[in-house]
Image: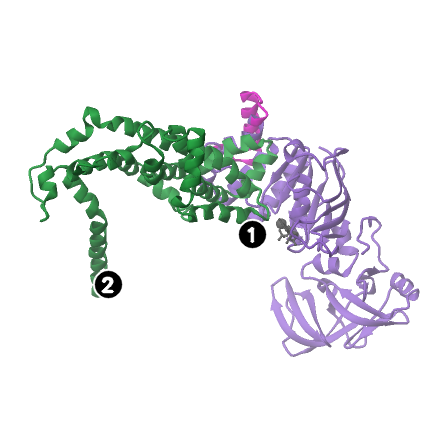
Chain colours: A green, B purple
Amino acid sequence: MKSQRFANTAMGVLAWVVALLIFFPILWLLLTAFKTEQQAFTVVPNFFFSPTLESFKTALAQGSGYWHYAWNSALTAVASTVIGLALAVPAAYAMAFYPNKRTDFLLVWMVSTKFIPAVGVLIPIYLVYSAVGLLDNALGLTLLFTAMNLPIIVWMVYSYFRDIPKDIVEAADIDGASIMQTLFKVVLPLALPGLASTGLLALILAWNESFWSITMTDHSAATLAVYIASFKSAEGLFWAKMSAASVLAIAPIIVLGWFTQRQMVRGLTFGAVK
Amino acid sequence: MAIVELKNVAKRYESQHKGSSSNNAVDNFNLVTRDGEFVVLVGPSGCGKSTTMRMIAGLERNTGGEILIGGKDVSQVPPKERDIAMVFQSYALYPHMSVAENMGFSLRLKKRPAEEIKQKIDEAAQTLGIEHLLDRKPRELSGGQRQRVALGRAIVRNPQVFLMDEPLSNLDAKLRVDMRAEIVKLHKRLNVTTFYVTHDQVEAMTMGERIVVMKDGEIQQIDTPINLYDFPANRFVAGFIGNPSMNFLRARHADGAVSGPGFAFTLDAAHTQAMASRRVVDVWVGVRPEHLRIGDAAGANRVEGTVDVVETLGAVTMVQLSVGEHVVTAQLPGHQTVRIGDTLTLTCDSDKLHLFDSESELAIGRESAAASSATAEA
Ligand SMILES: Nc1ncnc2c1ncn2[C@@H]1O[C@H](COP(=O)(O)OP(=O)(O)OP(=O)(O)O)[C@@H](O)[C@H]1O
Ligand SMILES: [Mg+2]
């Protein structure tokens, strides 16, 4: 009994240590955002200081363009998620309810496209984009995000559809429902928690994306990733301002994640716990 | 209500091997129902019962033959246009809809007026005794209640044909007996042509107006329950129908009698005549356990062996004896004094015997008057 309790306590402590370790960079980021540039630059870690909002003021100031970048981030993330789901649902529906010999291969192949590092396809995509005028363009970036997330979205939606017993789809078929009616009245309502968490994940991945955002945009379609990077300028690094900018960039998604965490957990367990 | 005709219906799944023709999931299925008939499909697991139902429903395309519902070839018609209702083994209720919504789904899709839908749901709910459950979700129901909702969803449609694939197999024994009677009653009232799949021969015998016995994708026999019992067309049907199942003894025929180690029977006129015209002398003798009774060692019909097992069930006593290489089960009246190790002699009337060809395993010399031409010839 006693050793059991000790083990539990030890596990608890270990969990906290790991959690703190993971959380520390974010904590440090938060602290730094409230420091002056001088305080931020000290070599000796400094936990006690009088917080200032100076960096936030600069980060949000007229010329910084925060709202411009935030709008681009939101637009491309939401649009790519909506397009991604719209494309993934029919694909996943066909694969889940009308599988054939090639379905498994197709799934693996789709996900295997994620094995290629993004830089590997940078040159061809850059050239094509520059030829068709999609560089620094919100539509271009949206398409990239969609393509980037589509395999994951299809895979996830497919898993949620697979959790729906085939009998139910066949019952709808016999009850006289068309494919569209089966999809909208039976399959989608049943897969809604899964679709929601898939959408959230796609949204977060697109929002946090930085490689394509930084390389394919300049200003007009630039997202918050570009905004953060802009604080590393020729005149040097501005730790405090960069931290404040980062906090502002990740805040919306963290708030969203916080409010939807129940949904996320429910969806991400992939129907394992019914 | 409609007549359903299946003509040489066959199904081969894509994944099955191309070369071998013998292993179609369903092969050469011929059946014409009466209008409003209750047909039971029965057979061991994997014999093609569900496949046949799914082809009638249109969930699977038949790869051979034709299926006609009400005289119309539906082989190319999608399920939703076949006007059939199906009750699934898993019930397949829509989990996100209430009981009423589940039952009214098909009518809503047809855009029927709301009052009509409500009235039909109420009617069906009353028939099935589930009026108090209409607002519940399927997960808030017991197995038996779900079963009723699934039936209700089928009957509000007022379809041409009902298909039920092992609808009772997820219920406990007592509920199963109750629902069995209820489905029969329901069928009497609605008089809709019904196909009912089960692998439980008691269910088949008690419910079916006609029973289709299947094995390995092929029909073995189609007949009324009592004819299947009295005139099994082959050894498989003889062993499948009846509980406990028929005893089979390998025997040789000579001069109107069949015998083997530990047993001998004289044949009745019909069997004698049938055997007279045959050259082959090896046959299977079939005797139902309930037709065996205590006999004496000097009798003309006798089976003699040592008792291995005695099961006292009250009304009856089940006895198993070793007869030569065979094990023979007998169902004797209760209160027997036999004990394990005893030597026991049993007897049976000649007209209760069944003979089967030792090679083809087809019945010899007994034909049901109604024996249909659809009986398997393979
Ligand atoms: N989708 C499929 N693909 C390939 N073969 C299949 C498929 N469905 C069924 N089969 C095969 O067809 C045969 C008949 O199957 P079916 O489901 O009709 O049997 P059943 O009589 O309903 O059995 P059970 O009593 O177990 O339900 C089996 O050999 C089965 O393996
Ligand atoms: Mg089956």
Let me know if residue B289 is in the magenta part: no
Q: Position of residue A29 (x, y in %)?
A: 18, 42
Q: Quadrant of residue B231?
A: bottom right
The reply to whether callout 1 and callout 2 are in contact (CB within 8 Å) is no
**Residue B296 vs residue A26, the one in the foreground:** A26
Considering the numbered disc 1 on the image, is that residue within a helix, a strand or a loop? helix
Report the amino acid beneath label 2. Gln
Give the alpha-carbon distance from disc 1 to disc 2, as whole Å. 45 Å
Count residues near mark 1 (Cα–Cα under 10 Å), then give few for <14, some for 14-19, many for 20+. few
**Which quadrant is home to the C terminus of chain B?**
bottom right
Relative side of A4 to A152, left or right: left
Residue located at (74% from left, 75% from top): B304
B326, above or below A81, in the image = below
Asked whether residue B268 is in view, the answer is: yes
Report the amino acid beneath label 1. Ala
Labels 1 and 2 share a subunit? no
Count residues near mark 2 (Cα–Cα under 10 Å), then give few for <14, some for 14-19, many for 20+. few
Relative side of A3 to B352, left or right: left
Q: Quadrant of residue B85?
A: top right
Q: Which residues are magenta?
A: B109-133
**Residue at numbered disc 1:** B173
Judged by its main secondary structure, the magenta piece is helix
Q: Position of residue A194 (x, y in %)?
A: 42, 40
**Residue at numbered disc 2:** A4
Q: In which chain is the residue bearing label 1?
A: B
**Which quadrant is home to the N terminus of chain B?**
top right
Considering the numbered disc 2 on the image, is that residue within a helix, a strand or a loop? helix
A138, above or below A97, in the image = above
Q: In which chain is the residue bearing label 2?
A: A
